[in-house]
Amino acid sequence: MQACFGFTLPSSGDNIRMNPDLGGGALLDAGSYALSLIRLAMGAAPVRVQAEASWADTGVDISMTATLVYADGRRAQLSCAMDAAYHRRGTIVGSRATIDTDFLNHTSAQLAGDRYGYLPSLLRVRRGTANTTSFEEIHADSGSGFRFAAEAFAKVVDEHDFGAIRRAAEASLDNAAPKPATPMLRNASVIAAEIPARDHPVSMPIGSRNTASENTTPIATHVISAPAATSGQLRSVAR
């Protein structure tokens, strides 16, 4: 599976997304949408993640890519950015079908001219394995995602569906909670102290923290015990 979401900030001077103390950064903003889609499709948290980020002057990740590995061997790829042209797409590939979607928050039935600026949503399915098989477009209700969320919550309350509330809460907490440590190999990384970390993204498995300011001498490759990947940890993984 692959999921991506990115855009260009109209102004970065006082934008909250550029403040690390206020939860800024590409992962916690755009990346959360891609990760939510991945969690919905995969149905579980990964056991290992490798992430790579580019850093802004303010100390937030301006863009990030990550590979998530699951206990059963499945993999997902995530990318997010705040310095790129707008893009948003998710692709889910199974052994017998493919799903392609731009998983928009808010949608419109109009191709253009919506008073809120909403656009039509793309959701299509290819049933089969051949490249000659055409995609089937799936149509759903259009409108405000906030309204759909409110209606879904009202339905849960009206039907006393406490199981749905519990499952949603468990998934949310599972995305951010540490998992049992598992041994993994950390890649060696050497960065000169005078080179800004933002100019040289660092890639390594979760559980290690590497930035230009923290590593000024060579680090030998070695095995470490690291917690499995969570959404709350992804941002620190790539630093």
Image: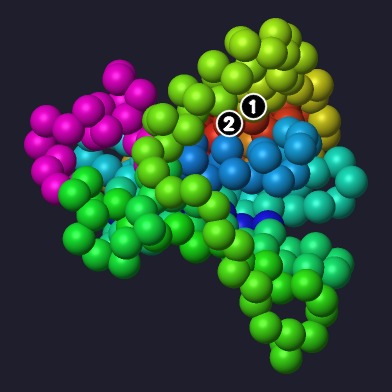
What is the quadrant of the N terminus in the image?
Answer: bottom right
Residue 3: x percent and y percent?
Answer: 56, 54
Q: In which quarter of the image is residue 164?
A: top right
Amino acid, disc 1: Asn
Do tag 2 and tag 1 residues touch (Cβ < 8 Å)? yes
Residue 40, position as x, y percentages in the image? 67, 40
Q: Which residue lies furthest to the right in this view?
A: 72
Residue 124 rendering spot, x and y as whole percentages: 61, 66
**What residue is shown with label 2?**
231
Secondary structure of the residue carrying tag 1 is: helix
Front in this rendered view, residue 236 or 30 = 30
Q: Which mark is residue 20?
A: none
Magenta region: 8-29
Tag of residue 175: 1
Query: In the drawing, does residue 156 fall left or right of residue 48?
Result: left
Q: Is residue 28 magenta?
A: yes
| Secondary element at image label 2 | helix
- Please give left or right for residue 212 compared with residue 93 in the image: left
Look at the picture and state if 90 lies above or below 172: below
The residue at the point 10 percent across, 36 percent down is 13
